[in-house]
Image (cartoon, rainbow, N blue to C red):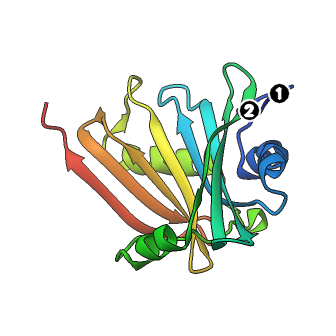
Amino acid sequence: MRISQGLAGEVHTVRDAIAVAHPIARREVESARACSVVAMVEAKSRAVASITVGFMAYRRRLLGGARLWQGFVATNNRTRQTKLVASGEFGPEQFAQLSARPGSEFPPEPLDAEAVVLDVPDVLRLAAERLALKGAAFQSDEPVQLVLRNKGGRHEWHLTHEAHHGFGAYVLVVDARSREITFEQSSPDDG
């Protein structure tokens, strides 16, 4: 079952995205908590095309023990629609397998929207400024992806752009609270 709702306006920030998406996730699981945000942005205009919020919740079952529910609610700013796009449960065996994988960071930690000082527009502005210092800019035909996750209590934005003038790929990782840049890498344009 797909659950959706119309929007009165566009969604540009983490707080707004969670506020719009949370009621839809709660229709599936009352205790759903936001654990990730993915924003897709048009490079030229820096307009947020869509924001997807990942949610999770633990469910207790009489048979089969505890399960982890995970769902994703997407907001499309063009169509002004928000809907549940995917959901599922991980049983004890799947949970153990995913948790055991090195670097899996599974299950994801819940987000604290209040910890986000640097939001989508701020990260885009910072990346554009840093690229300009290198004589580069976002290309208009390739989207910019921003992913927000909580890693050990530290909320981090991961911005990636696969093609921009002067470089083939650009990655920027920045702390959403302190604004500290923890990683930045550009690769030369091969074409």
Pointer 2 and pointer 1: residues touching (CB < 8 Å)? yes
Task: Classify residue 41 by image quadrant.
Answer: top right
Give how far across and how far down residue 162 sits, in percent. 32, 39
Q: Position of residue 73 (x, y in %)?
A: 68, 42
Total numbered badges shown on the rendered structure: 2
Instruction: Determine whether, in the image, residue 5 is placed left or right of residue 59.
Output: right
Residue at 57% of width from left, 80% of height from top?
152
**Residue 103 position by quadrant:** bottom left
Split into 4 quadrants, where in the image is the N terminus? top right
Residue that carries the numbered disc 1 in the rendered image? 7
- Residue 12 sits above or below residue 99 on the image: above
Q: Amino acid at mark 2?
A: Thr
Query: Which quarter of the rendering shows the C terminus?
Result: top left
Q: Is residue 22 above or below residue 118?
A: above
186 versus 80 height, above or below: below
Kind of residue at disc 1: Leu
- What numbered label is drawn on residue 82? 2
**Can residue 59 be seen by looking at this rendering?**
yes
Residue 31 on image: x %, y %: 81, 63
* Other-residue count near label 1 (Cα within 10 Å), few / some / many at <14 / 14–19 / ≥20: some
Is label 2 in a helix, a strand or a loop?
strand
Vertical placement of 181 versus 30: above or below? below
Identify the secondary structure beneath mark 1.
Answer: loop
Q: Residue at x 79, y 45 (%)?
A: 16
**x 80%, y 49%: residue:** 22
* CA distance for labels 2 and 1: 7 Å
Q: Earlier in the sequence, mark 2 or mark 1?
A: 1
